[in-house]
Image (spheres, rainbow, N blue to C red):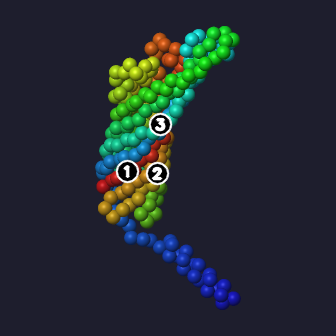
Amino acid sequence: MKRIIVFLFILSSLVASSQEQRIKNLSNFDRKWLHFGFTVGLSYFDASIALSDEFLQQTSTGEYNINHVYSIENQPAPGFHLGPIVNLRISEYLDARALVDLSFGQRNLDYTLRDTIGDAESLYTVHRMKIESIFLELPMQLKYKAKRLNNIRPYVIIGVTPKWDMAANKKIKDEERPMIRFKPFDVFWEVGMGVDYYLPFFKFSTELKYQVGLFDITRPDNTQYTKSINKMTSRMLVLSFHFEG
């Protein structure tokens, strides 16, 4: 019985100590109505492709020409981003946040081409289009924060991000052809979550968000490479590291 009492006493002491309030770093940080910082991180470029009726009909009937598009696959590729942050305090649990990011990356489209006429033996070749992008982004977000626990504070975000692709009109080299282009402007909606860590001299945050483009980014060029696509929209997974002071 005594051993049980001692065990319960030790357990209750450990639980109590774990709940003990620690010294808070940057105790007045969240009371500032405006603060600044910067962000760096990794991006994962992806796309959703809806094939055209013309392409689907041709595939179902098997009426192929020489070097005709047989399939299209998007191969996601990594990138990175960086830029400044401006954070405006609205209430104890709600902030408005604006960023100006530069994002670098590319999307890879694998076109499988089929060489055949009628029922003749087919030859398949794959042509990869490496389409580079340099985005100027203006994310505008609402940040809802949970109650701070010692030096940690989780949060969720929702927002919209206009993006301008500054590489959309760059000259296509002869060795890169055939190559399609994307439209330079798109708007993304985004949701995400993160954690604020209050360090002695600044606040560090890790954040993961998912972005979906609202517009069709395909730019028709009267070739089979764009005629095969009815609609293509962007997808991005973004891991960010924020530093605010």
Q: Amino acid at mark 1?
A: His
Q: What is the residue that sits farthest to the bottom in this orientation?
A: 2
Q: Toward which corner of the image does residue 170 lie, by quadrant? A: top left
- Is residue 196 depicted above or below 183 in this figure? below
Residue type pointed to by label 3 = Ala
Q: Nearer the viewer, mark 3 or mark 2?
A: 3
- Disc on the earlier residue, 3 or 2: 3
Snapshot quadrant of residue 60: top right
Please give the name of the residue rendered at 51% of the width and 24% of the height, measured from the top-left corner. Answer: 127
Residue type for callout 2? Gly
Asked if one can make out residue 140 in the rendered structure from this viewpoint, the answer is: no
| Marks 1 and 3, the one that precedes in the sequence | 3
Indicate the quadrant where residue 10 lies.
Answer: bottom right
Measured as percent of width and height from the top left, residue 31 is found at 34, 57
Dot 2, how many residues are within 10 Å of its Cα: few (below 14), some (14-19), or many (20+)?
many
Q: Who's the residue at 42% across and 56% down the image?
A: 196
Considering the numbered disc 1 on the image, is that residue within a helix, a strand or a loop?
Answer: strand
Question: What residue would you read off at disc 3?
Answer: 77
What residue is disc 2 on? Answer: 194
Instruction: From the image, tell me which residue sits under label 1.
Output: 242
Report how far apart the C-alphas of labels 1 and 3 lie in the structure. Answer: 23 Å
Asked if the residue at tag 2 contacts the one at tag 1, i.e. Cβ–Cβ closer than 8 Å, the answer is yes
Q: Residue at x 37, y 46 (%)?
A: 40
Local SS, label 3: strand
Secondary structure of residue under mark 2: strand
Q: Residue at x 45, y 14 (%)?
A: 221
Q: Position of residue 92 (x, y in %)?
A: 40, 55
Q: Nearer the viewer, residue 3 or 226?
A: 226
